Amino acid sequence: MENAIAQFTYLPSTKAERETFVQMCVDEITSGARNPLQLEIMLKNLEETVNAIRKHPEVKEAIQAEAEKFNEKTFKVFGCSVTKASRASYDFTHCQDSTWERLNSNKQSISEQLKDRENFLKAIKPGMSVADPDTGEIIYPPSWTSSEYLTIKLP
């Protein structure tokens, strides 16, 4: 594909076009004109392709360099508003702060205790009630919902 990016011009580029495109896809699926699993696989492939392009270091660098040509923090280009931003990320493990280390250790310990307790609560089946040995409170099983999904591994 010599002009790979040109392929994206076939996709919708405005909110109205996206809404129309989505509805057309929904209609094709619900009418039985297209196989829904085929669509799901196409979408997964497109999603992974877009993510790979966005994460590619050279592409990220080129995008940032192009944005730096604009002096404003927020600028308009190709009909869109683009805002330059930065994100700071801190690593506190090298601060040698005993208070932070203690609090972090407590946080990890509490997270483990909470997970253990949640596993205990999940083991209580509907219709069962269990008395807490320390407080005597009656403990009931947690409410839950489930949803079905597919995992797709592309070739």
Image (cartoon, rainbow, N blue to C red):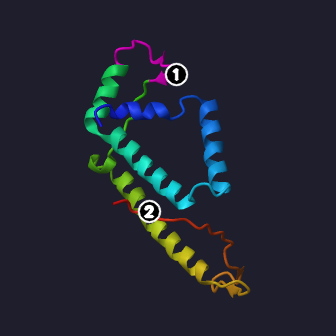
Residue type at the position of mark 2? Ile
Asked whether 71 falls inside the magenta stretch, the response is yes
Q: Which of 106 and 129 is in front in this view?
A: 129
Residue 110 colored in magenta in the image = no
Mark 1 or mark 2: which is in front?
2
Q: In which quarter of the image is residue 141?
A: bottom right
**The label number, if any, that marks residue 49 in the structure image:** none
Identify residue type, mark 1: Ser
Would residue 20 appear left or right of 58 to someone viewing this image? Answer: right
Label 2 crowd (10 A; few <14 / some 14-19 / many >=20): few
| Rendered position, 57 above or below 49 | above
The 10 Å Cα crowd at callout 1, few under 14, some 14 to 19, many 20 or more, is few
Name the residue beneath numbered marker 1: 81
Q: Which element carries disc 1, helix, strand or loop?
A: strand
In the image, what residue occupies the spot 71% across and 86% down? 129
Query: Does 152 appear above or below 115?
Result: above
In the structure shown, which secondary structural element does the residue marked by tag 2 occupy? loop
* Left or right of 37 on screen, residue 33: right
Compared across the picture, whether 73 is left or right of 89 comes to right
**Span highlighted in magenta in the image:** 68-83
